[in-house]
Image (spheres, helix red, strand yellow):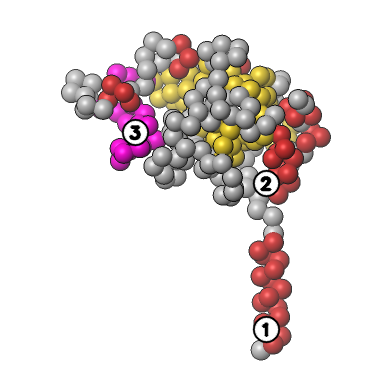
Amino acid sequence: MKLFQTILLAWSVVFLTKPCMALDPNVEQLIVSIAPTWSSMTGKLQCFEKVNGKWIPASAVIPVLYGKNGLAWGIGEHPHQEGLAKEEKDRRSPAGIFTIGTIYTYDSALPKGANFPFHTIGKGDAWIDDVTHPKYNQHVVIDPANPPPWFEKQKMRHGDFAYRWLVEIRHNSNPPQSGKGSAIFFHIRRGESTPTFGCTTMAEKDLVKLIQWLRANKKPTYVLLPAEEYRKLFKPWGLPEPKSIPSVLAF
């Protein structure tokens, strides 16, 4: 009996102290974005592909913008982290690891060469950011000829150049928790220094290249972290080593 207890204790210690590989080992496309600090509203982004088990750069380093108030821990594929957590209307971008969902666009097709699930936004499309709504942080389609009272404030905007391409970042999505942040996307920036309400934005040419690169069968995933957190978490989370992304971490 004592021998069994000793073996069980040893197994428990090994299991419980094993590093948590937050990144799915089947992910073959990784979008890495690094902010200088938690309060930064600007940073850098680079795409990587896994080749023979190693992360290889698949794009140039590009400048990006985050929420006006910086970053806060989001809800994604990573383990729960202690610290400031993302909340609705806090003007912070969610930090962590997130899968890429659907691309929403005003266009009837994606840019030439792109091959990814997409949805053309129509007159009845809405994304719910009302924390009291049962479909909070979800895409819904209503009858535009008979819209509900909430629709005008929740509809996905038409004619706004910044939202021509919306690449879904699946923060707080499985399932959504009320008040923990909604409608997080990659989209076109409004200016070189104009921050967001929580999305990650970039120049349209860079966003189009990102869309053309994405492939659903490679399980594209987004990692957003402040530089200090990245250096602490890259190994247990299975992310590219800092020495392989010096330009993204250089501030």
| Residue located 70% across and 44% down the image | 233
* Identity of the residue furthest to the bottom in this view: 1
| Residue located 59% across and 29% down the image | 70
Which-is-in-front pick, marks 3 and 2? 3
Tell whether 211 sits left or right of 125: right
Please state which amino acid type lies under the numbered disc 2. Answer: Trp
Range drawn in magenta: 121-142
Mark 3–mark 2 Cα distance, whole angstroms, equals 33 Å
Q: Earlier in the sequence, mark 3 or mark 1?
A: 1
Which-is-in-front pick, marks 3 and 1? 3
| Residue 172 on image: x %, y % | 47, 40
| Residue located 36% across and 14% down the image | 158
The residue identified by callout 2 is: 237
Q: Is residue 200 above or below residue 109?
A: below
Question: From where the camera sits, is residue 204 visible?
Answer: no
| Residue 230 on image: x %, y % | 70, 39
Mark 1–mark 2 Cα distance, whole angstroms, equals 32 Å
The residue identified by callout 3 is: 130
Pointers 3 and 1 in contact (C-beta within 8 Å): no
